Amino acid sequence: MARTIKNPKKAKRKNKGSKKGDGASTSSSVPTIQPRVWQPGVDELEEGEELQCDPSAYNSLHAFHIGWPCLSFDIVRDSLGSDRKDFPHTVYFVAGTQAEKASWNSIGVFKVSNISGKRRELVPKKSSEDDPDMDGESSDSDDSEDEEEGGSGAPVLQLRKVAHHGCVNRIRAMGQNPHICASWADSGHVQVWDFTSHLNALAESETEGIQGSSVFNQAPLVNFRGHKDEGYAIDWSPVVVGRLATGDCKNCIHLWEPTSDSTWNVDPTPFIGHSASVEDLQWSPTEPHAFVSCSVDGTITIWDIRIGKSPAASFKAHDADVNVISWNRQASCMLASGSDDGTFSIHDFRLLKDGNTVVAHFKYHKYPVTSIEWSPHEASTLAVSSSDNQLT
């Protein structure tokens, strides 16, 4: 990240006072400040400063303004290929808003197409300066690899909005049937939606630019009110189609079993094993009856729905709140967890009997870890985001 100093208020006043076609240049009155690299945990952001990204650090980077902020989003699986690498890309996803008033919220169903970018090696090749045996032709070919790939023109964002009463704490699309999505509301309701018509409309539409000024009023398939408080923990089983688990801030977890493609039976008796808020949960990528949850109480708990509503196992994972967890789908014995103290750990379930599951513990981030996820393609690679303005 490059660090540059700006004063947004002064800039706004200057822009307002200038007129198109003025002959006098104002560039000499604005001092040129050389950007410098921002060091997380070392440099403090002073008043009037803001972080700006260095585009050369990214293979692909595009931004859109969609209105209200969104606390949660999820990629919607499509039929375009699971590990596609060639630009231009197309992606579908869902996100829920955090609007000022409850009635202003919505769930957005998005399509972004014509995404351009660069294809580069993870480890750059040596330049001709580093290797005297390298000739000029190979150097030219390396440069060409960094050229932008993809279609002509800018990426296109298309959006269809569905009304949602209250802020959306978290939203998840079902892997097997991606048109089915579940949302956690700050009102304490969990709702399941069928977005088939919206995804079909986006898939059939050409690149017409951003839409979404109108909001569709659609009834959810299910509106569960059995939780005693709002929550954030929610996950679809990747093994059993339609099986869902939801956890709330009162330490309760409810199990959803599908009775058809559009109906669910939610067990009114919760799973209780944590002493504080359930922050996240994950179903096993291989076992149909097992899931794990994490909590503000600092623990990670393992559940088997066949043996009742008590934990199968539980262990202390962090010295602070455990905010997020991710179960590795390539190596199913591995679980990653992120904490409020900025640390994250890798756990090996095969070590449960030894009393300590931690095989790696990282203290890089300086503020709470807010998201963590294993790569779906590389068993040893994961992404971590934090309140320290970093994605690592």
Image (cartoon, grey):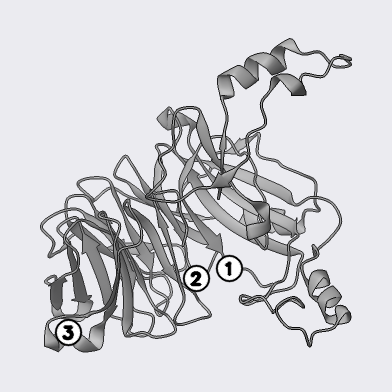
- Residue pushed farthest top? 17
> Callout 3: few (<14), some (14-19), or many (20+) C-alpha neighbours within 10 Å?
some
Of label 1 and label 3, which has the lower sequence position? Answer: 1
Tell me if 54 is positioned left or right of 164 in this view.
right
Q: Is residue 328 above or below residue 266?
A: below
The structure residue drawn at horizontal position 46% and vertical position 33%, both measured from the top left corner, is 99
Expressed as whole percent of the image width and height from the top left, the position of residue 315 reads 14, 73
Q: Looking at numbered disc 3 in the image, what kind of residue is underneath it? A: Leu
For discs 1 and 3, the disc positioned in front in the rendered view: 3
Q: Tell me, for residue 352, which label it has, or none.
A: 3
Residue 314 shows in the view: yes
Of label 2 and label 3, which has the lower sequence position? Answer: 2
Q: Looking at numbered disc 2 in the image, what kind of residue is underneath it? A: Gly
The structure residue drawn at horizontal position 19% and vertical position 53%, both measured from the top left corner, is 277
Q: Are marks 1 and 2 in contact (CB under 8 Å)?
A: yes
Q: Nearer the viewer, residue 341 or 34?
A: 34
Query: What element does badge 2 sit on?
Result: loop
Q: Nearer the viewer, residue 12 or 315?
A: 12
Expressed as whole percent of the image width and height from the top left, the position of residue 244 reads 35, 66
Query: What element does badge 3 sit on?
Result: helix
Q: Are marks 2 and 3 in contact (CB under 8 Å)?
A: no
The structure residue drawn at horizontal position 55% and vertical position 61%, both measured from the top left corner, is 75
Report how far apart the C-alphas of labels 1 and 2 lie in the structure: 7 Å
Q: Tell me, for residue 175, which label it has, or none.
A: 2
Q: Tell me, for residue 77, which label it has, or none.
A: 1
Q: Looking at numbered disc 1 in the image, what kind of residue is underneath it? A: Arg
Q: Is residue 321 above or below residue 210?
A: below
Of label 1 and label 2, which has the lower sequence position? Answer: 1
Residue 179 shows in the view: no
Report how far apart the C-alphas of labels 1 and 3 lie in the structure: 34 Å
